[in-house]
Image (spheres, rainbow, N blue to C red):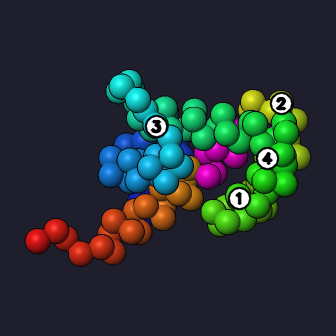
Amino acid sequence: MADKPTASSEAEWHPEEIRDVAERWALERGDASPDDPFRFLLGRVAMKVRGWLENDRRTLMQTLYRLDVSEAKVQTVLRGSGDFASQAMEIAKLILRRELQKARTRRQSSPPPS
């Protein structure tokens, strides 16, 4: 049985899944073509999460609920001793993992192009 992919193992995710999540989060890359799109995406999501942690926890919690991110895992991160930056990165990993799982399901369940 294969290990479940983690948010920190880009090799487990198909480029289409990463692209799908980037589009859904409206994360524009502009003209930059990062060498590691997964890390780029993780950094961008972490920036959004950090802003919510610092300024608008209600929006953060509503977003996590809407995205179906495990509340227990989020609470574990928030109870940890990290600062906003480290908490934001851990929550971003949870978000990214969940969003990539959903992208994979969409990709696998959609009919192949004819």
- Mark 2 or 3: in front is 3
Q: Position of residue 47 (x, y in %)?
A: 66, 34
Tell me the tag on residue 83: 2
Callout 4, which amino acid? Val
Residues packed near mark 1 inside 10 Å, few (<14), some (14 to 19) or many (20 plus): some
Residue 47 among those drawn in magenta: no
- Mark 4 or 1: in front is 1
Tell me the tag on residue 77: 4
Callout 2, which amino acid? Asp
Q: Position of residue 95 (x, y in %)?
A: 61, 52
Q: Is residue 88 left or right of residue 20?
A: right
- The first of marks 2 and 3 along the sequence is 3
Estimate the spatial distance between the alpha carbons at disc 2 and disc 3, rounded to whole Å.
27 Å
- The first of marks 2 and 4 along the sequence is 4
Q: Is residue 43 above or below residue 96?
A: above
- Mark 1 or 3: in front is 3
Tell me the tag on residue 64: 1
Assign the magenta stretch its main secondary structure.
helix
Callout 1, which amino acid? Leu
- Mark 2 or 1: in front is 1
Q: Residue at position x 16%, y 68% from top? A: 113
Mark 2 near mark 3, Cβ–Cβ under 8 Å? no
